[in-house]
Image: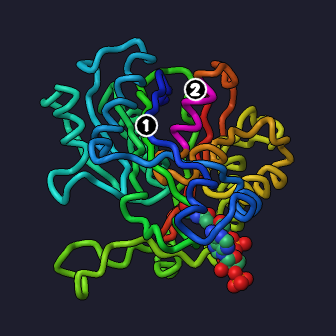
Amino acid sequence: MNYSRILGTGSYLPKKMVTNDELSKTVDTTDEWIATRTGIRARYVSNQEETSSYMGYHASLRAVEAAGLSVNDIDMIIVATTTPDKGLPNTACLLQERLGVTHIPAFDITAACAGFLYALSIADQYLRGGIIKTILVVGVDVLTAVTNWEDRSTCVLFGDGAGAVVLQVTDKPGILSTHLHADGRQKDSLTIPTWLPGQRKDDEPAYIHMDGRAVFRFAVKALGQVVEEALAANNMPQSAIDWLIPHQANLRIITALAEKLKLPLDKVVVTVDRHANTSAASVPMALDEAVRDGRIQRGQTLLLEAIGGGFVWGAALIIY
Ligand code: UT7
């Protein structure tokens, strides 16, 4: 039986870090409010050069190196992003060109903060099917580019970054299962209402809008259900999870889920305090951090989950 195995992970954070205290000089907020409500203390903000393809490129090089492979071993590139460099071509093609592997398929998928889970699931199907041997999956976003820096209800929440994994087909258990969901009825709760310039009224900028309370309520419920679904599909008790690698939007949501799974917080990878919400990058960046600092070991069981605007959400159970 075929499985997809994570061979290597990598990530990239922009050079510039902005603390809550720095933000509170330009917008009516405080470190205390942000930290208490969200757990966020700082975020990284990309510069003009640090686009999705640029950050994805650096994260990918690190993942390929960690996998012990060369870029020429990659057979397909999937990029999850809501903030592509350009309308056309897709960010995966720009990344493919940067990597110098201009003979392999490369495409983007858009599923907001759940984008990495969606991309991972697609890659898993190709690998399990034996169609392709090695896939590079990247989660990357520059949400600060679509942030209204005068809106304190959103601008304190987001940061930029990229995470990447190299997956390869194997006969030993790797990704056990992935579980994806969507509910378009919630389309107005978290949205960038306009995108193409021609759609904008009076050049209204394309900024992110969020009904924070509605997202919070839905997230706690949906993530609780999808992690239960993942465990049930594998006949696995909660106690089998070595590491929860959650989407990093709000420490209160992460804590609620850990409590539901009866997992102590030291079994949960948390980066939201330093990275804030990096959308599609949040799960692969957290994964990479815990792999590189030695917390996550080969053979351990990982539970990944994420939810984003749509709503779209998902989970994956993985033997690392
Ligand atoms: O990535 C997709 C997933 N996204 C999420 O999971 C986000 C989910 N939602 C949340 O994390 C929380 O709802 C927020 C952190 C966004 C907001 O926390 P909240 O406890 O729901 O606060 P609230 O929106 O109900 O606002 C409470 C108060 C309001 O003042 P009044 O009306 O009570 O006087 C806001 O105006 O806090 C005020 N407020 C702020 N105050 C200081 C809102 N933003 C700020 C701010 N600084 N940055």
Up the image or down, 252 lies above or below 309; here it is above
Most extreme residue toward the front is 25
In this rendering, would 106 be left or right of 6?
left
Q: Specify the principal SS of the magenta part.
A: helix
In this rendering, would 284 be left or right of 32?
left
Task: Give the residue at mark 2.
Answer: 173
Residue at the spot 39% in from the left edge and 52% down from the top edge: 142
Q: Residues within 10 Å of mark 2 (few under 14, many from 20)?
A: some
Mark carried by residue 103: none
Up the image or down, 269 lies above or below 279; here it is above
The image quadrant that residue 143 belongs to is bottom left
Most extreme residue toward the bottom is 201
Q: Quadrant of ligand 1?
A: bottom right
Q: Residues within 10 Å of mark 1 (few under 14, many from 20)?
A: few
Disc 1 element: loop
Up the image or down, 17 lies above or below 185; here it is above
Query: Which is more toward the observer, 194 or 50?
Result: 50
Give amino acid for label 2. Pro
Asked whether 287 falls inside the magenta stretch, the response is yes
Asked whether 72 falls inside the magenta stretch, the response is no
Find the magenta span and give its range. Answer: 283-291
Residue 220 point in image, percent of width and height: 71, 65
Residue 177 point in image, percent of width and height: 56, 42
